[in-house]
Amino acid sequence: MEMTGQVVWTGSSSMQIDLEVHALPDGKPWISASFTFVARHPQTGKATAINKLKPESAAERETFSAVEQKNQRRKTLRKAKGTEGSPSLKSGAVDVETMIKLLLSQARPLMEMPCLADPTCVLVDKTRASNSSIMQPQQRNMLNRVFGGFLMRRAYEIAYSTCYLFAGSRPEFFQVAHVDFTSPVDVGDLMRFDAAVLYTHTGQETGSPHVHVQVVASICRPETVHSTISNTFNFVFRVPGRPTVRKVLPANLDQAKRMIERMTAGLEDD
């Protein structure tokens, strides 16, 4: 295998690095990923200015422009979010209010008349799985924090298990849709990973059911009865052994907002 990467876009303090892994000797791309980094001042911890990237070739300018437009759309979506990190009901890109009403109306029979409800549907809460563990010294990075890759691995493992239990067939990894690192994790922290299926659809490329699993990682502090979300991971799996899987529906307003947020973000990620 050959791994290549380069900076494709820079802002005032952030940059995007695109990475590709190629299979040798034919050189066909095997996997690709985009990473966003933010420069922080070593003393203040605040964002600090970085050098500007000057694209030269037509391909570089096209990539730079595409990333710039995607970032602007994401900024617009963030501004449209509510106070709890969910989309505002006044989002112009999507008629969120109508979608929420539709999803909750479809979910109502599952909550009020489960014996008579559509057996091809299931509530988000029925797909949940969770585990907890103490972060160990061997998992720390050069900054003496817990390595983000380790947290992603733990999140992937529970996401895979959640999808397996939901679909009833061994899934295949398809995509890491989006990952948020919102709070650093220290050695000795008690970490809780909560996973749930947010929604499903049929993949256009594969024709197989695609299952979107969200994992929320939280730092738990039992002494103060307090927890802080450190990461949110979004994984997509395909289920080649099944023609269809159940449709997942929200049981409350918050779940409906998160579901629509990921559906909308999924369009942006594509």
Image: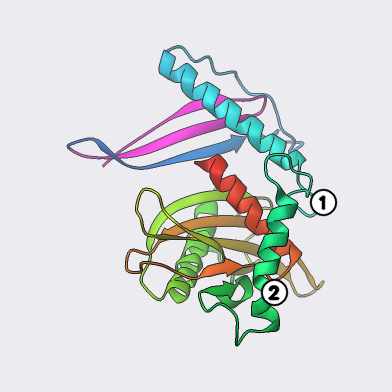
Kindly state the secondary structure of the residue where label 1 is placed: loop
Whether 23 is among the magenta residues is yes
Location of residue 119 in the rendering, given as x and y in whole percent from the top left corner: 52, 79
Q: Which is in the foreground here, disc 1 or disc 2?
A: 2
Judging by the rendered image, the residue that carries numbered circle 2 is 108
Picture residue at 51% right of the left edge, 50% below the top: 177
85 over 56 or under it: above or below = below
Rendering coords of residue 206 (x, y %): 34, 53
- Stretch of the chain drawn in magenta: 1-24
Q: Which residue is mark 1?
A: 83
Three-letter residue code for mark 2: Arg
Q: Nearer the viewer, residue 47 or 34?
A: 34
Question: At 55% across and 18% down in the image, what residue appears?
Answer: 53
Instruction: Point out which mark residue 215 bears.
Output: none
- The answer to whether residue 128 shows anywhere in this view is no
Residue 191 vertical placement versus 51 (above, below): below
Question: Residue 85's spot in the image, x, y percent?
Answer: 75, 52
Which residue is most to the front? 116
Three-letter amino acid code at the position of disc 1? Thr
Q: In the figure, is residue 135 to the left or right of 205? A: right
Question: Residue lying farthest left?
Answer: 25
Q: Is residue 151 visible?
A: yes
Horizontal and vertical percent position of residue 148? 55, 53
Residue farthest to the top? Answer: 56
